[in-house]
Amino acid sequence: MMYATCEPCPMCVAVMMWAGIKTCYYASSHRDAAAHGFSDQHLRDYLDGSDKSAFDMIHVTQGREDCQAIWDEFTRLSAKP
């Protein structure tokens, strides 16, 4: 369970999801925050696909084997006995 002053931003939502938090109680909305100069709307627009202008995401395949080795090690280290 999480209590927050304001509706969590997309980064905070991601952390809560990874942490397994199932419920978040908040008072102010992201629109309330924007009215006071703190807007995460650009993040929300990017994540919902309505704004692609923030930056380009380019998937490269060179070095993929090295990355796979890192994932394999992560899996080995996080395996439950």
Image (tube, rainbow, N blue to C red):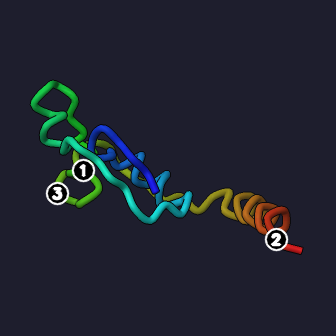
Q: Residue 45 versus residue 80: which sits nearer the camera?
A: 80
* Sequence-wise first label, 1 or 3: 1
Q: Quadrant of residue 48?
A: bottom left
Q: Residue 46 versus residue 65: which sits nearer the camera?
A: 46
Q: Residue at x 49, y 60 (%)?
A: 21
Q: Residue at x 19, y 51 (%)?
A: 51
Label 3 vs label 2, nearer the camera: 2
- Asked if residue 41 shows in the view, the reply is no
Residue 65 point in image, percent of width and height: 73, 64
Q: Quadrant of residue 58?
A: bottom left
Q: Residue furthest bottom?
A: 81
Residue linked to disc 3: 50
Q: Amino acid at mark 2?
A: Ala
Residue 27 point in image, percent of width and height: 23, 44
Q: Residue furthest top?
A: 37
Q: Residue furthest left?
A: 35
Q: Quick check: 47 above or below 41?
A: below
Q: Quadrant of the C terminus?
A: bottom right
Q: Residue at x 77, y 61 (%)?
A: 74
Q: CA distance from mark 3 to mark 2?
A: 38 Å
Q: Amino acid at mark 3?
A: Ser
At label 3, counting other C-alpha atoms closer than 10 Å, the crowd grade (few under 14, some 14-19, many 20 or more) is few
At label 2, counting other C-alpha atoms closer than 10 Å, the crowd grade (few under 14, some 14-19, many 20 or more) is few
Residue linked to disc 1: 44
Q: Quadrant of residue 68?
A: bottom right
Residue linked to disc 2: 79
Secondary structure of residue under mark 2: loop
Say left or right for 79 vs 3: right
Q: Amino acid at mark 1?
A: Arg
